[in-house]
Image (spheres, helix red, strand yellow):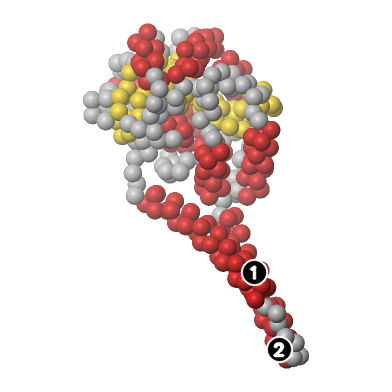
Amino acid sequence: MKLSIVVPCFNEEACLDELHRRLCAAAQSAVGEDYELVLVNDGSRDGSWVAMQRMAAENPHLVAINLSRNHGHQLALTAGLDLCRGDTILIIDADLQDPPELVGPMLAAMRESGADVVYGVRRSRAGDTAFKRATAHGFYRLLSRATEVAIPLDAGDFRLMSRRALDALLAMPEQARFIRGMVAWIGFKQVPFAYDRQQRFAGETKYPLKKMMRFALDALTGFSSAPLKLASHAGLWLSLGSVVLVLYIAYAWASGRSIQGWTSLMLVVVILGAIQMFVLALMGEYIGRLYNEVKRRPLYIVQEVAGMPELPAGERRKSRLGVVADGATAIGGD
């Protein structure tokens, strides 16, 4: 199969029909009939799964995967990538902010450059608030300076990947996934593809501020030890500061000066206590990640699959990173 298009979906009922129409048209224009759409329902609470089942019954190219609960965007995307079977894989979100019609030009760019990854770089972000544009701009640049891996600026998960690049990505089993960073880590030839991001077609963003902060923290702690280094540097400077303070107190005592100290003492105690709690929180974040990793739980659980055609034995792919529940489909067989 030439092309798989993987789409994680959470409460995207209002977008699905238009998404389906535009993805099918774009895929047929690019590769003819040799493609599949893999829609992953990430525990939606609206009618998304019912709509996916309906579309899967009508379209033999569509495979709908229903996860057992809400796993989060990155794990839902991982499930789709793990279970798709194309030689080339397009990652795209369901909100239609990333135009499906770019799949043809991205395939052409991949062929011309001989690249394994063509990643979308946002020239503009229509519909985003000034706050979101500013925080996204700052986040990507902070991440670029803090991480040991060169992660492209202003690039989301919208990208085209070869099968060998995807296989390398799927060899990375960590729980807290930052897929755009993981793709950068695997290497191979990767080229940018500039485009203008559009407004969300319908519905509301699935990344409120709280999730954005969690996502940013996962990115920083997953690809950089800089926060731990920051904590150690803060401890070093505070130690030096405490030595200076002790010397000052000794000098004041020796010279007979009275130290009016309650306010300043409390200020120092509060500042030191706050910094200590900050350092402990950073250490706890890394320890928590270690705790989750050593449990070795599957990354996702598939409850049901709709639209999976009968495939020759050689084309079926086992789930490498998750679990397909008994009776869900033949997708996990040989």
Q: Position of residue 103 (x, y in %)?
A: 57, 18
Q: Quadrant of residue 311?
A: top left
Q: CA distance from mark 2 to mark 1?
A: 20 Å
Which of the numbered marks, if any, corresponds to residue 267? 1
Q: Residue at x 23, y 25 (%)?
A: 327
Residue 255 horizontal/vertical position (percent): 76, 90
**Crowding near the residue tagged with mark 2, few <14, some 14–19, many ≥20 C-alpha atoms within 10 Å:** few
Q: Residue 261 at x, y = what percent?
A: 67, 78
Q: Quadrant of the C terminus?
A: top left
Query: Which residue was labeled with disc 2?
Result: 253
Q: Residue at x 59, y 27 (%)?
A: 118
User: Tag 1's secondary structure?
Assistant: helix
Taking the image as drawn, is residue 81 in sight? no
Q: Please, what is the three-letter code of the amino acid marked with disc 1? A: Leu
Residue flagged by tag 2: what amino acid is it? Trp
User: Contact, CB < 8 Å: mark 2 with mark 1?
Assistant: no
Residue found 58% across the figure and 63% down from its top = 274
Camera-side residue: 269 or 315?
269
Q: Is residue 216 above or below residue 243?
A: above
Q: Quadrant of the N terminus?
A: top left
Determine whether 262 is above or below 95 in the image. below
Which sits earlier in the primary sequence, circle 2 or circle 1?
Answer: 2
Q: What is the secondary structure assignment of the residue under circle 2?
A: helix
